[in-house]
Image: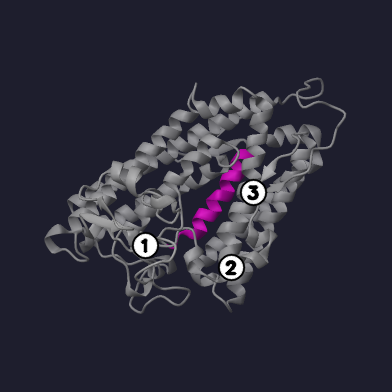
Amino acid sequence: MRGLFVGAVLSFALGSTAYATTTPKAVVTNYADLALAEYEDALSSAKLLQSAVNTLLAKPGADTLKAARVAWLEARVPYQQTEAFRFGNPIVDDWEGRVNAWPLDEGMIDYVDASYGTNSDVNAYYVVNVIANDKISVGGKAVDVSHITPTLLREVLHEADGNEANVATGYHAVEFLLWGQDLNGTGPAPEGRTGTPQERHAGNRPHTDFDVANCTGGHCERRGQYLKAATDLLVSDLTEMVDNWAVKGEARAAVEDDPKAGLVAMLTGLGSLSYGELAGERIKLGLMLHDPEEEHDCFSDNTHNSHLYDQVGMMNVYTGQYKRVDGTVVKGESLANLVKERDARLNEEVLAKLDTTLKAMQAMKEHAETVETYDQMIAQGNEKGNAIIQAVIDSLVAQTRSFERVIAVLELGEVQIEGSDSLDNAGAVFQ
């Protein structure tokens, strides 16, 4: 954890309205409204994914598998924007591990390539392959997995043995089941693959892995049961978070009942996502190691979009507006307004830094979708690709410094922003 400095004492108080028209109360109320809208969109998109998965399982085919994959990709757009509500809101952080935990040891779930290995010194569940077995034995203990249900995934398998690599639920478990392993590393896509760089380089699970009558990969009925259970859980979990931000919801109450604490939550979320999580753990670490296993959406090669929409989510929070999936806009009083009334130049600085990062993200996205995928961009020796990714990291770090100045100007005291060894102590990464 990086402790930020205590905000300087200014000549006006945070709650003063003598020279200000924007109140902290109005800002945090709009913040909660944005959260509700974004989680509602994430839920509605997950329900479309759920429908596509049900169609795939009822009528397995290349077209229904592609439709399910497209639905997953579209569901990521609103969800990634909600990540700006993490870190500062314990209700969200305690819940997030159910829906977006990564990376995962996929051998716990299904068959894997021989290159994956047969055991792990740190994970007893590494290759137990739940889909292929009615019972598994871990550490001499028999575990009944004959019925693949949401309860089994949530209460027995997810983070089994306290190991965070045992990801049994959420977007990435569904992603693995829809795409399968991405075995392309940082090299070129296999010959014969067609489509965009993303389509050529991602995992290549056949639709027959879900076709009981023409089964490949074995255990197609159980694979379908797992996919359905994981998708149903995703919808259930997102429903819970929508309720938390609704009127009288627990997450909304936590920020509205104490506006200053709400502002702290907002800046903690912005700083921590920008710095330790995104610039550090999700991007810099993979670039340092040149390791495709560190890419966020590794099976679908959708990482460039996930990073981009994290940035969009941070911009939503700062500017106080969100463009919904249906095109309508939710907007209201914002941090930008609050900062502008106290230090107009700082507000301009923050907006400029956010825009610079967005442009760096857009350059990354364009390169990933027209030239080479994200995992190829982080390859050792790929100077151009590495430089594009490093520009994103540098911009995220720079905008975090501006968030720090906002914390001081708003006199929020000491705010804890998540750090990352990859940014703060690079030597520890290689120990």
Q: Earlier in the sequence, mark 2 or mark 3?
A: 2
10 Å neighbourhood of mark 2: few (<14), some, or many (≥20)?
many
Q: CA distance from mark 3 to mark 1?
A: 29 Å
- Where is 73 relative to 324, above or below? below
Seen in the image, is 399 located left or right of residue 118?
A: right
Residue shown at 61% from the left, 65% from the top: 429
Q: Residues within 10 Å of mark 1 (few under 14, many from 20)?
A: many
Question: Where in the figure is residue 388, as x and y percent of width and height?
Answer: 61, 67
> Which residue is found at the position 48% from the left and 43% from the top?
96
Residue 321 shows in the view: yes
- Give the residue number, with chain letter if any, for mark 2: 287
Up-down: is 177 above or below 230?
below
Left or right: residue 24 versus residue 89 is right
Q: Which residues are magenta?
A: 301-319
Residue 341 in the image: above or below residue 428: above
Q: Which residue is mark 1?
A: 126
The picture places residue 241, in percent across and down from the top left corner, at 45, 34
Report the quarter where the C terminus lies: bottom right
Q: Give the main secondary structure of the magenta stretch.
A: helix
Q: Is residue 333 visible?
A: no
**Which one is in front in this view, the residue at disc 2 or the one at disc 3?**
3
Distance Cα–Cα, label 1 vs label 2: 25 Å
The residue wearing badge 3 is 418
Q: Looking at the picture, how far across and down is residue 168, in whole percent?
A: 36, 51
**Please, is residue 175 above or below residue 4 in the view?**
below
